[in-house]
Amino acid sequence: MKISNLIEQIKLKKSYLCVGIDPDLDKIPEHIKKLEDPLYFFSKAIIDSTIEFSVAIKFNIAFFEVYGVKGISSLERLINYVNKKYPKIFTIADAKRGDIGNSSDRYAKAYFDKFGFDSITVSPYMGKDSIEPFLSFKDKYAIILALTSNSGSKDFQLIPSEGKRVYERVLIESRKWKGSANIMYVVGATKASHLADIRRIIPDSFLLIPGIGRQGGSLKEVSFLGMNNNIGILVNSSRSIIYASKNEDFADIAGFEASKLQGEMELILKEKKFL
Amino acid sequence: MKISNLIEQIKLKKSYLCVGIDPDLDKIPEHIKKLEDPLYFFSKAIIDSTIEFSVAIKFNIAFFEVYGVKGISSLERLINYVNKKYPKIFTIADAKRGDIGNSSDRYAKAYFDKFGFDSITVSPYMGKDSIEPFLSFKDKYAIILALTSNSGSKDFQLIPSEGKRVYERVLIESRKWKGSANIMYVVGATKASHLADIRRIIPDSFLLIPGIGRQGGSLKEVSFLGMNNNIGILVNSSRSIIYASKNEDFADIAGFEASKLQGEMELILKEKKFL
């Protein structure tokens, strides 16, 4: 998917919401647990009821991998469903992969070619040759972890290095890599105070911003600090949408929660003169 | 598996060799490609013929994930075979995972409980709460990327931060984490000059050292610099063993290559008075 198409969708749907799919068998409604592929049916119901209000779907791969072959099979079924039914939605494999070149190349092929995602989150610790294999696919994106929403982000991402923070050096270095037009970045909503600095280094890149809702970040704050001239942000919400209800109405309630966020986003997009 | 059992196996087999399983359908012998599960049969043949000379097997998850559900199914079949047939071998999921707490917890459960590996490689970029979920499993190990063998290791791992390198800060910080006795570290053989510094910071931890053979590291050099009083190292070789021959004799030749490394390791273990 081209970035220009993503921006078009944001304007059309008046939303830059990304719905995070973290399906947990311990948390999904009882009547779904009894089905033959509960991960698939739960996730599909959430997607169908939130699609009107969202432009992106982020699949948390850990929540599929934990169920082994069966989990990966549900993931494959889901992404095939989404690519067929909703070809204009931007899909993210939240996988945090990254390895030496020939292994990263396999991860890229797995998520872009085999599964057919538009993008994958990647960890920058191993440097340039661990990320570049993800950047050579047309209209596919590597979303590099820059500054994450968790408390451990202070351990290494925020430590100083020659007048910069380590995460700033990740932003600066990665801009020089081959295929860098295909890079987006993860910046946690809980780190809003850094967004102005981040935008000075990467004014044009798209940001994926997780951490509003349960993790405590503010939608309005991250939107005003994170947006650029092309909107430039996707804001993710997972648990506060998908587990808003544990009853039979879970999908409707998820849709309602997504619609509330879409409503707030529409106001912000208007205030910023994008609509 | 307990570390004491691993050390016992090293002394018994006179080897600290880890065989890396990176099965690539483009590189495996023609007669294997025709089988119904070539990843499994190729890997199994390599394992059966090298097991006598090795104490650990490292499965490169990227090379399974690239084949989707079928690849993960081969992986599951392989690890079940190994755990049943060779319960004393130390198994490593080379997966480089790491995510916020509840996601890392799922990855830990996937690899330790569901698949049954003894250990998994993890990336430290997201800090303490991304790794601690891997450290609460009895006799299971998180092998943290410290200083990797690839050229990109210079981009962030080797940059300075308050008088240390970033990878040294990873070593120093991670020692303080809950369950740190279950941590091992990846240090690339191509970075042998750093091993003395590393041993000053983490004298007691086991190191997984990839990068001899095709990547250019020297077995003797890394062994003398990396060993501690309890041996303390596993040295991995992947491609120079598993692709030593592309013919029908591939497994025998892999066994032969492994035996050569075992022979060199035996001499080093004797010189260091471990045997």
Image (cartoon, coloured by chain):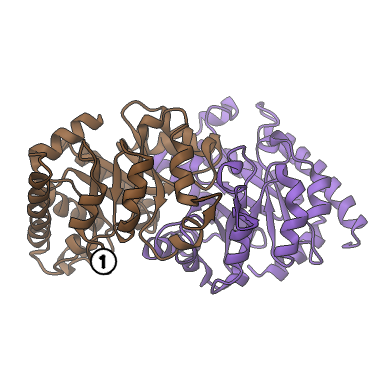
Chain colours: A brown, B purple
Q: Is residue B105 left or right of residue A261?
A: right
Element type where label 1 sits in the image:
loop
Q: Which quarter of the rendered picture does the C terminus of chain A lie within?
A: top left
Q: Position of residue A26 (x, y in %)?
A: 28, 69
Residue, x 32% and y 38% (percent of image)? A203
**Residue B183 x, y percent position in the rendering:** 60, 65
Q: Quadrant of the N terminus of chain A?
A: top left
Q: Relative to B255, is A128 on the left or the right?
A: left
Residue found 62% across the figure and 61% down from its top = B171
The percent position of residue A64, horizontal first and vertical second, equals: 34, 54
Q: Which residue is mark 1?
A: A216
- Identify the image quadrant of residue B182: bottom right
Q: Nearer the viewer, residue A7 or B273?
A: A7
Instruction: State whether residue B215 is above or below residue A259.
Output: above
In the picture provided, is B237 more to the left or to the right than B140?
right
Image height of A196 relative to B272, above or below: above
Is residue B36 at all visible to an observer of this figure? no
Q: Chain of mark 1?
A: A
Query: Looking at the picture, does residue A220 appear above or below residue A179?
Result: below
- The residue lying toward the viewer, choosing from A198 and A55, is A198
Mark 1: amino acid: Gly
Q: Residue at x 25, y 29 (%)?
A: A2
